[in-house]
Image (cartoon, grey):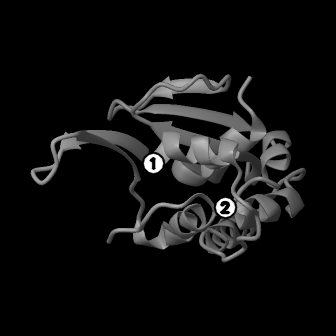
Amino acid sequence: MVSDKYLAGLIDADGCFDLRVSKVGEVYYIRPRVRITQKAFLPIPWRHRVTKAGYNEWSIEGISVINRVKKYLVLKSGQAQWLSQTDTSGGHTISELRQIKAELKATRYESTVKNFPTRKWLAGYFDGDGCLTAGLRTDRVKPYVAAMITVHQDDLTAIELIQKNFGGQIVS
């Protein structure tokens, strides 16, 4: 079984929160969903499919997983918190659905970072956005191995927290 801390790191790196929408007549029903998309295959016991582009996608619906991982999320804790407080039990009109989607999108980059990244979180985050590289520098005779995490500029908060708590350097 995958630990909740590891899963939170993986969601912060390569996951997203969204809504699965189904329509019955003129009423829309929504269910919160967590999705993780990656090239590599991961041992996550969720619904799995391979996308047309060849990526692996895992998803799970419902609030239970969100409630389990939200206390360990670093970057996406705002979305998880918002989803856990949103009523998804009833039907919605199209305008209500659009409003709910807009509110969820607005929480995407909220600065709600208050969690200390644990080692298990870092392992999940590294599996999402990290890589190991090795080489031989021209000014040295011994090879080197480096662990690197590459992120979008909007996700620098995670890299700064990793550096502060685990060391290393940030290179732009």
Q: Is tag 1's residue or tag 2's residue first in the polypeptide sequence?
A: 2
Where in the figure is residue 3, as x and y percent of width and height?
A: 75, 33
- Relative to the observer, which residue lies in front, 54 or 3? 3
- Relative to the observer, which residue lies in front, 42 or 89? 42
* Distance Cα–Cα, label 1 vs label 2: 15 Å
- Relative to the observer, which residue lies in front, 159 or 44? 159
Q: How many marks?
A: 2
Residue closest to the far left:
138
In the picture, the quarter occupied by the N terminus is top right
Q: Which residue is mark 1?
A: 129
- Relative to the observer, which residue lies in front, 115 or 93? 115
Local crowd size for mark 1, using a 10 Å CA cut-off: few (<14), some (14–19), many (≥20)? some
Q: Nearer the viewer, mark 1 or mark 2?
A: 1
Residue 49 visible in image: yes
**Does residue 142 appear left or right of residue 119 in this picture?**
left
Residue 24 visible in image: no
Look at the numbered discs 1 and 2 and tell me whether their residues touch, using CB distance below 8 Å.
no
Q: Which residue is mark 2?
A: 76
Q: Is residue 147 above or below residue 153?
A: above
- What amino acid is labelled 2 in the image? Lys
Image quarter of residue 133: top left
* Label 1: element kind: helix
In the picture, the quarter occupied by the C terminus is bottom left
Q: Which residue shows up at 56% across the image and 47% down it? A: 125
Where in the figure is residue 74, as x and y percent of width and height?
A: 68, 61
Q: Which residue shows up at 45% across the image and 37% down it? A: 38
Disc assigned to residue 52? none
Image quarter of residue 111: bottom right
Q: Which residue shows up at 58% across the image and 32% down it? A: 58
* Label 2: element kind: loop
